[in-house]
Image: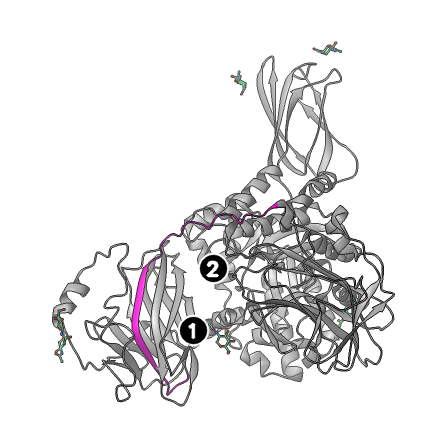
Amino acid sequence: MGLNRIYKIMGHRLNFVNLSKILSVWLLVLICFTSCSWGRDNPKSPRTYLNNSSHCKSLSQGSLILGDESIALNPDFDNGLSNWAGKGCQIILHDSLSDGKIVPQSGKYFISTTGRADSGSGIQQELTGRAKRKLAYELTAVVRIYGGNVPEANIQATLWIQTADFRQQFIFIASVNATDSDWVQMQGKFLINGFPSKVLIFLEGPPPGTDILLNSLVVKHAAKMPPSPPPKFEVGDFWVNVVTNSNQNDGTTSDWFCLGSCTLSVGTGSPNQLPSLAAESLGLHHQPVSGGYILATNRAAPWMGPAQTVTGKIKLYMTYQVSAWVRIGPGAIRPQLVNVAVSIDGQWVNGGSIEIGDDKTWHEVAGSFRIEKQPTNVMVYVQGPDAGIDLMLAGMQIFAVDRSARFQSLKKQTNMVRKRDVILRLTGTDSSNGTKIRVKQTRNSFPIGSCLSRNNIDNEDFVNFFVRHFTWSVFENELKWFYTEPQQGNLNYKDADDLLNFCTSHNIKVRGHSIFWEDPNAVQPWVRALNGNDLISAVQNRVTGLVTRYKGKFKHYDVDNEILHSSFYKDRLGNSIRAYMFNTTRQLDPLPTLFLNDFHIEDGNDFRSSPEKYTQLILDLKQQGAPVGGIGIQGHIDSPVGPIVRSALDKLGILRLPIWFTELDVSSTNEYTRADDLEVMLREAFAHPAVDGIVLWGFWELLMNRQNAFLVNAEGDLTEAGRRFLALKQEWLSHAHGFIDNEGQFSFRGYHGSYKLEIFGPNGNITRSFNVGRGKGPLLIPIHV
Ligand SMILES: *[C@@H]1O[C@H](CO)[C@@H](O)[C@H](O)[C@H]1NC(C)=O
Ligand SMILES: *[C@@H]1O[C@H](CO)[C@@H](O)[C@H](O)[C@H]1NC(C)=O
Ligand SMILES: *[C@@H]1O[C@H](CO)[C@@H](O)[C@H](O)[C@H]1NC(C)=O
Ligand SMILES: *[C@@H]1O[C@H](CO)[C@@H](O)[C@H](O)[C@H]1NC(C)=O
Ligand SMILES: *[C@@H]1O[C@H](CO)[C@@H](O)[C@H](O)[C@H]1NC(C)=O
Ligand SMILES: *[C@@H]1O[C@H](CO)[C@@H](O)[C@H](O)[C@H]1NC(C)=O
């Protein structure tokens, strides 16, 4: 994916990942193809109304910039317009504007653009020579907009780089919704990887005719913040249900109220056992379930239903599992959504969502959430079915999960799934009884990878980490259609080729991602403009061009991305287009395993992409003859809970196709919490027999899509999440030592992978290497020494 994803349910906005960023990625790609020239014959001469030559000298002549000084010169315009320029427009210095209604927020001056011809016009400064590679910089700017009858517009800060080998890069730094009523601050960080021969920073974005005002723009080496301490929890914080009167034991609805307009009453006859996912987590901690339920009738809108205030009971950084039995009343004419919502100071947080197609049975809704900012008001409520459809809620549980409690059982499962008994049978002069022997695993063969994008491989520190710790890769955007063909016939495989060469030379296997992507926001305008036969032939050219070019190079293909969430090609060309995409890829390249790839499969949070729906869709495609060979779970997950993830893997596992986590990332502002999330996901995946590999969606700060998800910070320091990752990789290497027995054998149980064997024989030390593959029963390895 790599996109920000915003959609609405029940009038509440969910921000899953962040859409503006991918849009900016391909906007920048488009810019690069349509108007790369601006970077070469750049600044337009600004009109200068004010000048202060005394400042000019002292600031612009000094080439040495100290650590906490701004590398953007003349940041407050005390020195007039020097160092600043218009980009596609002119700039003017002001001490006030609009009859004194607009004055600087700080300092004496601000500047404005005038005559912006398009949204790419704005303000720029050249940072060449002052912006160093591999240092993290932080931008802080104070902006607003003016004129053009636009009350609000997005302003973006971008870095443009030309490298010594004449490649151009655009690095997104920050964006803010600026208004015409007040100054707002924008902030963001950036990192330069390649050797830049020219660097510019610029602001742009609002529609033409609207001016950008800039009060100050400072770019400094980013201060290193010490990590927050690990959150502290007491044993008694775990497993306690924060929902009260969840079983209606006293026959009343006390503690509950109806959110909106509906009538609550009590019924009996719901299941008198816990739903399985809650039972699995709670184990012996669980309270009995009585069979009483809350009935909500006369619901006037989908968002209305039973609610309870839980303010003060939810701890920061704690992971809460949500579980309830739900059922709908009769009268629905289509499947109904049921969602457990948590309202945090009015913000909607998802606690699980399912779709129910019948009014006959109870269904488990399960999810999880976490909050990382102190709220003043927290409420949980159950919502979703159409107005007039009754809603029943039984045995609702919200409890804090002690995540490490599960790890012991995962280690046992891992021991079964990822290890094998090995018998080394030694022959030869040095294999006598009692000879000392040592076995060391050098590599676990379970695939663990991370995504790459072109500019990452210019950073040698990043490259060092990557090649030491990953054996698989996927390209973040470089293979996507909008990237390889931003305009029809204008093909760009250069960056994908560079990345593929990099991977080949480091013996890294690559997933091809993705041939098509059904999200209309990720379909470039020229493709969106096509219909019928024109679109079919464009689709044919795309698959043929890509797959023929890279025949035999990729081990996997994501053939058609995110088909549970979007349907651009299917809507335009019919359902059979998907089988066609799979068939054609298979015909052109028999090697790669052909995957589907989608998100929110494993967390209970998205009714559109439940494991059941994914299973049905895969079966439908196979029914049509499509050679679907693998199941991709992206894994952009929040607050993961082991049993929920496991249950999704179990359900998909019955298809007997390899499952991969293809874009795993976890996010928390506290790096210890982030480390815990990562450990949960890696252990669950590694312990499950159907999972064949894990690919992270980046790991280096500022070089990955998701915020607060990095394992290594921008300048190469490991975070706690990084340490946890490396510790797990160590744990997943087996070592053994002992003596050759009287049958000339040495036995041990170890993880699949490559090993080094040392024999300390009477005639000196001998080393050999051997490999332990997956398979049934003990592996007998003859070794002659
Ligand atoms: C501003 O300074 C520049 C260079 O120092 C000079 O060329 C220009 O004439 C000055 N403009 C005014 C209005 O003083
Ligand atoms: C020019 O800069 C000097 C030195 O900082 C300052 O004293 C003076 O007020 C400035 N003049 C203007 C017109 O801003
Ligand atoms: C700007 O506003 C839009 C629309 O209201 C919203 O979707 C977006 O998240 C906002 N962006 C920022 C950076 O606040
Ligand atoms: C895909 O291939 C299968 C098996 O060869 C075939 O039955 C099916 O009709 C093909 N579908 C399309 C849309 O090409
Ligand atoms: C192998 O070595 C052990 C311990 O050194 C000894 O007890 C045993 O008798 C030896 N067996 C043979 C067959 O030599
Ligand atoms: C064999 O290896 C051991 C342990 O690493 C070492 O102490 C010893 O010196 C080595 N012997 C020879 C002959 O290299």
Residue at the disc numbered 2: 454
Disc 1, ligand 3: is the CB inside 8 Å? yes
Q: Residue at x 42, y 52 (%)?
A: 459
Residue at coordinates 43% horizontally, 75% vertically from top-left?
A: 31
Give the secondary structure at mark 2. helix
- Whether the magenta-drawn stretch holds residue 677 is answered as no
What is the crowding at mark 2: few (fewer than 14 residues within 10 Å), some, or many (at least 20)? Answer: some
The spot of residue 409 in percent (x, y) is 72, 42
User: Splitting the image into 4 quarters, where does residue 162 fall?
Assistant: bottom left
Residue kind at label 1, given as amino acid type: Val
Q: Quadrant of residue 197?
A: bottom left
Q: Say which mark, if any, is on residue 176.
A: 1
Closer to the chain start, of discs 2 and 1, is 1
Q: Is residue 442 above or below residue 666?
A: above
In the picture, measured across the screen, residue 346 lies left or right of residue 773, that is left
Q: Is residue 220 left or right of residue 342?
A: left
Label 1 sits on a secondary structure element that is strand
Q: Is residue 408 above or below residue 188?
A: above
Q: Residues within 10 Å of mark 1 (few under 14, many from 20)?
A: some
Question: Are dots 2 and 1 in contact, CB under 8 Å?
Answer: no
Q: Is residue 216 magenta?
A: yes
Residue 687 in picture, x, y percent from top left: 70, 45
Dominant SS of magenta comes to: loop
- Label 2 and label 1: CA atoms lie apart by 26 Å
Segment tinted magenta in the rendering:
207-234
Which image quarter holds the C terminus?
A: top right
Q: 477 or 751, which lies in front?
A: 751
Q: Position of residue 651 (x, y in %)?
A: 78, 57
Q: Where ligand 1 lies, by image quadrant?
A: bottom left
Three-letter amino acid code at the position of disc 2: Arg
